[in-house]
Image (cartoon, helix red, strand yellow):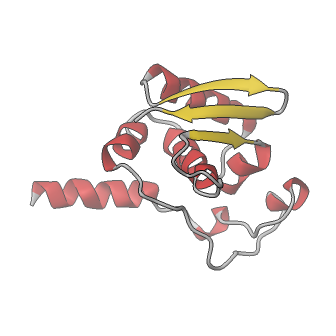
Amino acid sequence: MEDRTMIDDLVNQLRLPDAVIPQTGNADNIADTGDIEEGWFIRGPISGSWISKAAHLGGHTVNVALAILYVKGFQKNRKNNMAELERFHFDRFGVKKDSARRALNRLQEAGLIKYTKDGQKYKVTIIN
C-alpha cells in the first residue's frame, strides 16, 4: 500500500497542468500560445529510478529532466544518451531560463547528467 502511495505521489508530481502544454512551433510562439497540442509525448523507456531522483531534487528539476528526455526521444540514434536543448524546450515544460540553469546544475550535482553550454544551447549527456 505504501509503494502505491509513493507511485501515485510521483505521478501527480510529473503531471503537467494543461496550461503548460503549448502547441508545437518555433521558439517565438511556443511560450505565447494558450492552445493545447494534442498527441505529443515523451518516448521511453524512462528509467523510474532516474526520474524519481530528479523529482526529489526540488524546484523545476523534474520539469527539466522531462525536457531532456523529450528531446532525447526524438533523436535519430535514441541509444545515444545526448540531448541538445534550446530555450523553447524548457518553455514547453514551464521552466524559465534561470530556473533551467539551476535545475541543470542540480541534475549534474546529483550525478544524473553532465552538461555544457554552447551559445544558446545546452548539450546534455544523460548518466544512467
Q: In the rendered view, tell whether residue 99 sits above or below residue 111.
A: below
At 15% across and 55% down in the image, what residue appears? 3
Q: What residue occupies the far right of the structure in this picture?
A: 28
**Viewer-nearest residue: 13 or 105:** 105
Residue 123 in the image, given as x and y percentages of width and height: 68, 32
**Viewer-nearest residue: 30 or 47:** 47
Residue 20 in the image, given as x and y percentages of width and height: 65, 62
At 45% across and 32% down in the image, what residue appears? 127
Image quarter in which the C terminus is found: top left
At 23% across and 53% down in the image, what residue appears? 6
Q: In the rendered view, tell whether residue 36 sits above or below residue 51.
A: below
117 to the left or right of 75: right
Q: In the rendered view, tell whether residue 108 sits above or below residue 23.
A: above
128 to the left or right of 27: left
Residue 77 in the image, given as x and y percentages of width and height: 60, 51
37 to the left or right of 65: right
Q: Quadrant of residue 118?
A: top right
124 to the left or right of 110: right
Q: What residue occupies the far top of the structure in this picture?
A: 109
